[in-house]
Amino acid sequence: MLLRLLLLVCAPLSEANVLSLKVRPPQPIEGNSATLTCEVQTPSQMLQFCFLKDGQTLGLGWSNSSKLHIAAVRKRDTGYYWCMAKTAQLKFPQSKSIQIHVQGVPVSNVRLETQPQGGHVMEGEKLVFVCLVSGGTGDITFFWYKGTLGLNLETKTQQSLTAKFEIPVVKMNDSDQYYCAADNGYGLSLSELVNVTVRIPVSQPTFTLGASSTQAVVGDMVELHCEVQKGSPPILYWFCHEDVTLGSTSAPSGGRASFNFSLTAEHSGTFSCKADNGLGSQRSEMLSLNVTVPTENRDLLPSGVIEGLFGVIGIIIVILSLCCWFKKKIERPPDRNILRNPPRLLPQDSTYLNSSVPVQPEPVYQNANVSNDDKIYSLVYHMHQERQIVAGPSRTHIEDMDPAAIYARLKKANGIDVDYEDAM
């Protein structure tokens, strides 16, 4: 009877104490928490529970708790689960297994940032690349690439939405385009390209003169050259004479720059150049140039001034010529009043002697004055003498000589008739 009673009591108990496993939430999302509960139809204070996944005991094994809490499920937590229960005297059959499929979230919004920001870094400094994702669950694998062809620089896997890669000492050839990628098992997601520019300060420029020597002549065209061996573009060059800037030019792609100008006497002295790319300027060594002035050019005036002087001199010459002509015109007396030498009587021997009939003497003339023009002035004298006959009373009388001035205007040209004008 006792044995039968025990069988009746135990049989309903074993059937009634069926175990079942519950999961909340039924489809957990990777990264979120999940709770497993082992339920018994007739709970007992003396029961112990154990949870298993694919035959592997979870947690600490047997415990008094009918629940197992997972703070953050991972994709690897996907599998088949069941639970078991027991008392000190009785072990219950295990529950039915259930499949738990952990839902993952693909990475999204992958981007690449640089430190320093903007991708501008000085040569020799440290450059840090930060790859970030705004969404994604589980372990994320990060990749860093250089260039558009995708040269892989680094790969890291971690349970984080951010990962870093750094270049401790940047060199000039590190200037390029970079991007990163991330994957958590749901597909690779790429960032956009980021430009990285490694800036190099300019070195001391090399300065040369286009002249073949340190001697030059006023008016020569001289070409100045300035070049840096090292320095990231763009580069701005200045060309200086002493401390005065002659001009400037830019080299957008770096390299050499030139400046042309015409020499004057004031350009004797030292010349130099400066270079700057925004990271500090450098000045070249100074070169001397001696500018000489040709002897024949020292007293020369500009062509415009010379033309003006010739014009003024020409006007002065014309004015002076007119003044002289008017002065001579005013000062010269009329032809009839030209001042002449007083007439001189030319003594002539008498053509008659002891004759009662007076004989008329021949007229005598001589040139008196020659004018400045083409006219010749002559004086003609007519002399009359009377002599008393020796037989008569003795007296001698010479008539008043009243010479008749005869003016003749003779032309110099030979063979031309001469016109006479007599005035008594």
Image (cartoon, rainbow, N blue to C red):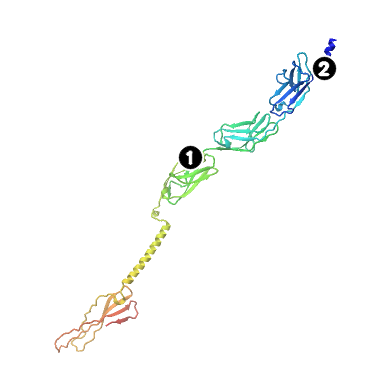
SS of the residue under disc 2: helix
Sort mark 1 into few (<14), some (14-19) or many (20+) by Cα contacts within 10 Å: some
Residue under label 1, please give it: 282
Which is in the foreground here, disc 1 or disc 2?
A: 2
Give x and y (percent) for residue 405: 26, 80
Q: Quadrant of the N terminus?
A: top right
Q: Is residue 231 above or below residue 164?
A: below
Tell how many labels.
Answer: 2
Q: Is residue 76 above or below residue 348?
A: above
Sort mark 2 into few (<14), some (14-19) or many (20+) by Cα contacts within 10 Å: few
Give x and y (percent) for residue 408: 30, 79
Of labels 1 and 2, earlier in sequence is 2
SS of the residue under disc 1: strand
Residue under label 2, please give it: 12
Query: Residues at badges 1 and 2 in contact (C-beta under 8 Å)?
Result: no
Q: Quadrant of the C terminus?
A: bottom left
Which of the two residues, 46 or 370, is positioned nearer the viewer here? Answer: 46
The amino acid type found where label 2 is placed reads: Pro
Q: Which mark is residue 237?
A: none
Q: Is residue 193 left or right of residue 233?
A: right
Quadrant hosting residue 367? bottom left
Q: Is residue 160 above or below residue 10?
A: below
Give x and y (percent) for residue 319: 37, 66
Estimate the spatial distance between the alpha carbons at disc 1 and disc 2, rounded to whole Å: 99 Å
The amino acid type found where label 1 is placed reads: Gln
